[in-house]
Image (cartoon, grey):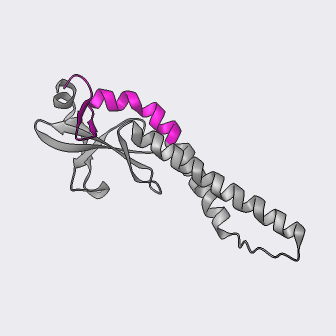
Amino acid sequence: MNRLQKTHDQIYFTLEQAQALLPKIKRLAKRLMKIKKSIEIYDLIDVEFDDDNYTEHIRNLRINKQFHKLHYEFFTLLEAIEGTGAIVKDLDLGLIDFFSFHGTKEILLCWKIGEPKLSHWHEVHEGYEQRRPIFFLEDELKEE
């Protein structure tokens, strides 16, 4: 598999292709995590609209507007990441997966924010806890 392979709207990557995409994914994922934290802070603010207090009403409108603006930006970034073929598995942990093949077997290349490169994989039906070092597969994945 020398180029991106797309099957049923699913994009499959070689290890080299996924590694090449990682700088873009890192940038987008870090921004996505920051926005998520901001949304969580805004979510703690109790916004009640009181027709009798105009100043508070305007303040609440601005808070509400910013809250929705952050949600829009969040989903725009999420769409940008997933539009590359990468899959956001767990934003709190910073887990991103890339579909790949090991021979004819479908696998996921697994990356966690903070890791310098893709260094783990797991089977499609498994999760983060079952991930294994990629060096066992590395030569085979590069050739496919």
Q: Residue at x 40, y 39 (%)?
A: 83
- In the depicted structure, whether residue 127 falls above or below residue 27: below
Write down the quadrant of residue 113 in the picture: top left
Span colored in magenta: 1-28
- In the depicted structure, whether residue 132 falls above or below residue 92: above
Q: Residue at x 19, y 28 (%)?
A: 139
Q: Residue at x 71, y 73 (%)?
A: 46
Question: Along the line of sight, which residue is nearer the eye, 126 or 73?
Answer: 73
Quarter holding the N terminus?
top left
Residue 53 percent across, percent down from the top left: 88, 74
For residue 70, side relative to residue 131 (left or right):
right
Residue 38 percent across, percent down from the top left: 64, 56
Residue 17 percent across, percent down from the top left: 32, 28
- In the depicted structure, whether residue 24 falls above or below residue 108: above
Number of residue marks = 0
Residue 42 percent across, percent down from the top left: 67, 63
Question: Along the line of sight, which residue is nearer the eye, 39 or 54?
Answer: 54
For residue 36, side relative to residue 133 (left or right):
right
Write down the quadrant of residue 51 in the picture: bottom right
Tell whether position 26 is magenta.
yes
Q: Residue at x 82, y 68 (%)?
A: 57
Tell whether position 6 is magenta.
yes
Determine the residue located farthest toward the top in the rendered image: 2
Question: Along the line of sight, which residue is nearer the eye, 88 or 139?
Answer: 88
Quarter holding the C terminus?
top left
